[in-house]
């Protein structure tokens, strides 16, 4: 066997060989490219059992070319996140500088378990944590952070630390008798419950608190629930708050929670302070505007919303830890999540014997595996995040988000002029736009009138919109439109339990300018007009339903 063909050589860089292979694979999959459309080409008829049935691992080695030919089939139907018309969820265009750095780092097969397995590359993790700490308003010499496998990982770290702060003996004896409880927002991510499940606290002991019409947790209700549980002898661990919910970018009132938390500590004479974690995976980027001169420009709709987000996000100084996903609003390749804690002593509760101050850390004695959730960690996340932060800089992030928010404001303003459309969340600070199409017989009704209709009418409107979701996917599959977005059967009209359903456009492409938004609006409206004219009674499709993304909360369908 010619090992050089597969492994290169240890005597020089193998980057040319890697690039050559990338080009060869690129040629093999080029038949699926569909530039300017939301997805690569594909047949949409894959049944996994049929695909796997005749698969057998080859005995003899394959050439790189044969291998690429074999795997090229798998590059069908991939979303093109850079396309401004791909508006499915919070998955961004990828910063190519970031991607290149991650790919080169991969070629070294660095293991961030300890510095001697990673060289100076491991300093990228510490550098990113410093920059994030600066944005948060935390002292980087007192803070600490670690990259992990995703948002569930950051929440696992936070929940574990909350448990250890309240009852350190659980490190050895485990959780007993369901006596612990956490607080989260009813608008929070399902992984908040899952973290309690995985740690043995129990999903039922992750108590969700109702939100107001803006999607923020009710501090009054949270305090009531906490006191009721403490009064019957349960142990309160802390909070898992929203730092920018998926759809509304709602940021919970962190300062009010902090002040309430201190009242709880005083009134119940707790010998610990319950932990305040903020799931900041989306909202953290608003802190790039901390020193932005808004001046008199807050009459600009986009800047006004960014300033509101920034003002809420600045309360992060009252939190104890955060989770941040660079592969969302940080424009990095998957996966790049970091957990950052304000007080490094909290972090080293994971193993008190391994506590280190920043001044005590030097090359040769930095071994994250002593306290990390994973013993094996890729360097992709840290180096991708650092490359993205350095390449774009504060000003670059500002430019991107001003452009995105301006384009979303334009989208909403234009959609609101169409008599077939009812906007649902026009005042939302988030990038997602929710709306419904009105069937002919409801065309003259406002959204306030529609939500007062009988259930059978609500269901009719809901199915009409779900059918439109199927319709646009069918058009997209056939390459007839250059946009796609999702529908949801279970979407509730804000502040009610009315499942009106909705269509959701979630733009995340850096290429979504106002000019692109204008073009897309025209194409969307043209598609809507055709939908009203065509037979839409029975559209069968394996369409992307937003309900599929997060279907479970505490094992119950939402």
Image: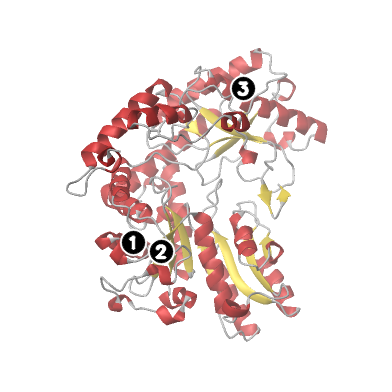
Q: Marks 2/3: CA distance?
A: 44 Å
Residue 523: which disc?
none
Position of residue 463 in the picture relative to residue 542 (left or right): right
Disc 1 is placed on an element classified as helix
Q: Would you say the residues marked 3 and 1 are in contact, meaning their CB atoms lie under 8 Å apart?
A: no
Depth check, mark 2 against mark 3: the one in front is 2
Instruction: Give the residue number, with chain letter if any, for mark 3.
Output: 471
Q: Is residue 370 above or below residue 132?
A: below
Front residue (pair 365, 77): 365
**Mark closer to the chain start, 2 or 3:** 2
**Mark closer to the chain start, 1 or 2:** 1
Q: Marks 1/2: CA distance?
A: 7 Å
Q: Marks 3/1: CA distance?
A: 45 Å
Instruction: Give the residue number, with chain letter if any, for mark 2.
Output: 146
Position of residue 174 in the picture relative to residue 43 (left or right): right
Q: Would you say the residues marked 1 and 2 are in contact, meaning their CB atoms lie under 8 Å apart?
A: yes
Position of residue 483 in the picture relative to residue 553 (left or right): left
Q: Is residue 395 visible?
A: no
Q: Is residue 139 above or below residue 460?
A: below
């Amino acid at each position: 066997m010619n090992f050089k063909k597969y492994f290169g050589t240890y005597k020089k860089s193998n980057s040319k060989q890697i690039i050559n292979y990338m080009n060869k694979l690129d040629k093999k999959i080029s038949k699926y490219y569909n530039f300017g459309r939301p997805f690569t080409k594909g047949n949409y008829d894959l049944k996994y059992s049929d695909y796997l049935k005749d698969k057998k691992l080859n005995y003899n080695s394959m050439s790189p070319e044969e291998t690429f030919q074999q795997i090229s089939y798998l590059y069908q139907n991939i979303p093109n996140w850079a396309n401004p018309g791909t508006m499915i969820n919070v998955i961004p265009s990828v910063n190519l500088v970031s991607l290149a750095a991650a790919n080169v780092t991969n070629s070294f097969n660095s293991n961030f378990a300890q510095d001697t397995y990673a060289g100076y590359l491991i300093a990228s993790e510490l550098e990113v944590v410093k920059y994030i700490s600066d944005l948060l308003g935390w002292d980087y010499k007192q803070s600490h952070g670690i990259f992990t496998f995703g948002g569930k990982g950051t929440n696992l770290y936070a929940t574990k630390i909350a448990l250890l702060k309240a009852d350190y003996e659980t490190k050895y004896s485990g959780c007993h008798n369901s006596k612990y409880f956490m607080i989260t927002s009813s608008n929070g991510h399902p992984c908040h419950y899952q973290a309690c499940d995985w740690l043995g606290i129990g999903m039922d002991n992750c108590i969700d608190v109702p939100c107001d019409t803006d999607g923020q947790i009710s501090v009054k209700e949270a305090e009531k629930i906490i006191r009721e549980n403490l009064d019957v002898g349960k142990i309160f661990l802390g909070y898992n708050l929203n730092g920018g919910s998926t759809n509304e970018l709602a940021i919970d009132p962190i300062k009010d929670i902090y002040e309430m938390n201190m009242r709880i500590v005083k009134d119940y004479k707790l010998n610990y302070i319950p932990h305040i974690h903020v799931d900041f995976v989306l909202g953290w980027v608003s802190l790039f505007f901390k020193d932005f001169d808004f001046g008199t420009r807050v009459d600009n709709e986009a800047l006004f919303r960014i300033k509101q987000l920034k003002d809420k996000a600045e309360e992060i100084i009252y939190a104890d830890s955060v989770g941040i996903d660079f592969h969302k609003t940080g424009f990095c390749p998957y996966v790049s999540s970091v957990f950052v804690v304000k007080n490094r002593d909290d972090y080293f509760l994971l193993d008190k014997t391994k506590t280190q101050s920043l001044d005590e850390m030097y090359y040769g004695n930095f071994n994250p595996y002593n306290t990390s959730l994973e013993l094996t960690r890729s360097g992709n996340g840290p180096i991708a995040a650092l490359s993205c932060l350095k390449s774009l800089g504060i000003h670059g992030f500002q430019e991107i988000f001003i452009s995105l928010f301006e384009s979303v404001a334009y989208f909403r303003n234009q959609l609101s002029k169409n008599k077939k459309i009812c906007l649902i969340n026009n005042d939302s600070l988030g990038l997602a736009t929710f709306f419904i199409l009105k069937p002919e017989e409801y065309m003259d009704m406002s959204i306030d009138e529609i939500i007062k209709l009988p259930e059978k009418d609500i269901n009719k409107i809901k199915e009409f919109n779900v059918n439109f979701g199927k319709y646009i996917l069918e058009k997209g599959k056939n390459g007839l439109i250059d946009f796609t977005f999702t529908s949801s059967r279970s979407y509730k009209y804000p502040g009610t339990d009315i499942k009106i359903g909705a269509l959701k456009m979630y733009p995340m492409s850096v290429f979504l300018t106002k000019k692109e938004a204008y073009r897309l609006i025209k194409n969307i409206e043209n598609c809507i007009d055709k939908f009203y004219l065509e037979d839409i009674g029975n559209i069968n499709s394996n369409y992307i339903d937003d309900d599929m993304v997060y279907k479970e909360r505490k094992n119950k369908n939402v």
